[in-house]
Structure formats: C-alpha cells, structure tokens
Amino acid sequence: MLKNVPEGAAGIGASADRVTVAYTYGFPLTAGGVEAHVLSLVDHGDSSRFRWLVIGDAGEEFRRLASRRGVPIVPWRGPRWPGDIAAAARLLGIVRRNRVGLLHAHSPRGLVQAAVAGRLARIPVVATVHLPVQFLIRGHGATARFKLAAYRLLDRALVRRLVPRTIFVASSVCRESVSRGLVLAERARVVRNGVELARFRGPHDRGEARRALGIPEAAVVACFVGRLETQKGIDTLVEAFATLPVEALDLYLLVAGDGSLRSGLEEAVRGGGRNDRVRFLSFRKDVEKVLGASDIFVLPSRFEAMPIALIEAMAAGLPSVVTDVGDNAEIVGDAGLGLVVPPGDVGALARGIDALARAAETRRDMGVRAREAARRYSAEVAAHDVERVYAEVLGKGGDGSARLP
C-alpha cells in the first residue's frame, strides 16, 4: 500500500493511503473499447491503493456506468490541435483542484496536454496506446499528413521525455513505435486488453438463443461483433458471405453492432438475396448470448491493435477467422486458434469461413484451445499489470520525492 505520499512529490493530493488516478481522453467517452477498458481498470483495480477520476467529455451512457461505480467525471474541453496550450492549462487547473496523483492518458489527442500538465503539477503521467496515431486521423490529404507529422514530432521531441511509461495493448504497435523513435524502449510496456472471462464462459442456452434468432439448431453460425464502420471491414464480410454456398453449408451470419454503414450493408444483403441468412442485431449488451449461439467468429478488420471482441470470442470457445492486422496473427494463427487472412481480401475471407464451416471437428479443437488461451487475457490480470506500471512511476527516491524521469 502507498502510504504517506507527500503532496507535490509523489502526487498532488495523493491521500494518506490512496493515490487519485485521473483518466483522460481527448475524444467524447461513449460506449466503445477504450471506455470498456477504463471501466474494467476501475472494476478490478486495488481500491485500497487508488481512487479514480475521469477527465473529459462523457456521453450519457458512460456517465451512467461511471456513476454506478462511484467514479466522478470532470468536464474538460480537449485540445483543438496537438499544440493547444490553453487545453493544457485547463487540464492543469483540473489536476490541481482535484488533487490528482497520477494522470493516465488514453488517446494521442490530449497526450501532449497531459504530459505538460503532469510535469507542471509534478505528478507522473502514463499513456496507453490503443491504436497507432495514423489510424485516428481522418482523411488522406495534406491536412491529415500535417496532423500526423505534428503528432509524431511532438512525440519525439516532448512526449517521450515527459511520459515515464507508455503502455501498449498490442506488441506489434509497441515494436513499431520503438523502431520509429516515438517512445524509448525502456519506458515501453505491453499490457494486452483483458475481458470478463466468466461472463463469456458461463452457461448459455444455445438452443434458446438460436430459437430467439430464428436459426435452426443444426445450422452453422458465423458471427461478427463490432462497430459497423470501415475500420472493421464489415463490408468485406458481407461481400464474402454473398459468394458462399450458404444453403449447402446451412450457414447463417449474425452481425452484432451498429454504425454508419448499417443501412448500406442491409441493402447489399437484400440485393444479394441473402436476407434470410443474415441477422443484423444492432448493439447488444448481451453479446455473450450472440457468441454462445455461434460456431465461428469473424473479424475482417482493416486495422486493429489488440481487439477485445476477439478475446471475448476466444473465451466463449469459438474458433476465429481474422485478418492479419495488429496482434491478430500472433494471438490466433501462432496458437492454432483459427485462420488468418489478408485484410481486404474478399476471396481469402470467404475461403476461410467456408473451410471452418465444413470442418466441425476442427472447429471444436480450435475452440477448446481458444478457451484455454483466453485465460491469459483476463480483466484481473490486465488491471494488475497496469497497476504494476503505476507502482513503477510512483516509486519514491531516497529523498522522498517521486522519480519523474
């Protein structure tokens, strides 16, 4: 336990026996993967050592979930551009007023401001990289290239000197960032995303779930869980499904999620005459039931780091067909938990689904190994490993001051 932490040394306002950890996010907090990650850290964190605060703009759903956990949210108007000094000043004021002892930034947008505010407040800053910055910048023109160059310049010149530890949820992204000089190797840590394993391993009535969805008990069911956006490659999946002999395979597709592509995808399915074989389920809070009704998990993403949905599917005992992006191949292909195909390759994706749909014994074997492998990605393990990083940067030197590199 961290006791008697001096104010202004190991953290302004760290109480006699707990440190206030403030999560910052430069985008609105809604109900995505980053938000789930933050809430999981709270759920499985050590409340005898830490208390938690969220700094940022939050939507109604996230506010409700944070309130249920007793986590206060302090509004912060995030930066308009990477070098927004006014945003850093606003963040510094929030940090001081709320006696924050450690800042944990979860997005490149706002990381510069967190680094500056942390140094001025004399508290450590930890950053988590969920996706490489190039995937967070919209567009492909001169403005997008300028923003990317600005972020990378600030990372090399400022962030890597002011941020004692950077956590990467994907080892592939960590390697790339170190090789580009965006972070110092000795300050980089890999802590992969964790999930609530018990939720996906619990008893689920497969027959009841299928009956509710209008799917025969003996059918083969592939499923997708995620946002219906270009990143996730759901359009590639719908196109691949249209080429499969679904009647001969007795194959169905479940699509759990919502997004801007939904109406176009539904129209494509109707136009291809597969409307009776595809179920668009919208956003589901009971995704474990969707996975429990399925035989194959498909994640055709164009880019990823370390997708939470994949670990959830593994915990549910499903083999996967995934694209070779982020850590997918390392997690799935190297361990024989499914098939790995090139991103954007409709034919390869269709062949992968077809192969698993025809091989019930292979699916069972892969599913057993996937369920066992998922044990390495529990929410408890992830929270513990993150708090080990906190302990590194909150460790005190011989003079009682925090070791802030």
Image (spheres, rainbow, N blue to C red):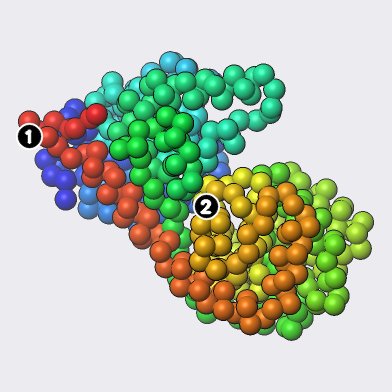
Q: Does dot 2 land on a helix, a strand or a loop? A: loop
- Considering every residue shown, the one lying at the far left of the view is 399
User: Are there few (<14), some (14-19), or many (20+) residues within 10 Å of tag 1?
Assistant: few
- Residue at 59%, 61% in the rendered image: 285
Residue 146, percent across and down? Answer: 59, 19
Residue 356 appearing in the image? yes
Residue 288 appearing in the image? no
Q: Three-letter amino acid code at disc 1?
A: Gly
* Quadrant that contains the C terminus: top left
Q: Is the residue 86 above or below the residue 185 in the image?
A: above
Q: Does dot 1 land on a helix, a strand or a loop? A: loop
- Residue at 15%, 42% in the rendered image: 16
Residue 217, percent across and down? Answer: 73, 83
**Residue 105 numbered tag:** none
Task: Give the side of residue 400 with respect to residue 345, left or right.
Answer: left
- Residue at 19%, 32% in the rendered image: 403
Q: Quadrant of residue 290?
A: bottom right
Residue 4, percent across and down? Answer: 11, 40
Q: Three-letter amino acid code at disc 2?
A: Asp
Q: Is the residue 321 above or below the residue 126 in the image?
A: below
**Residue 398 numbered tag:** 1
Looking at marks 1 and 2 on the same chain, the residue that comes earlier in the sequence is marked by: 2
User: Are there few (<14), some (14-19), or many (20+) residues within 10 Å of tag 2?
Assistant: many
Q: Which residue is mark 2?
A: 327
Task: Give the side of residue 276 with respect to residue 45, left or right.
Answer: right
Using the numbered discs, state the Cα–Cα distance from disc 1 to disc 2 in whole angstroms: 40 Å
Q: Is the residue 48 above or below the residue 362 in the image?
A: above
- Residue at 35%, 37% in the rendered image: 185
Q: Quadrant of residue 245?
A: bottom right
Front-lying residue, 327 or 318: 327
Q: Is the residue 246 above or below the residue 78 in the image?
A: below
Q: Of the residues tagged 1 and 2, which is closer to the observer?
A: 2
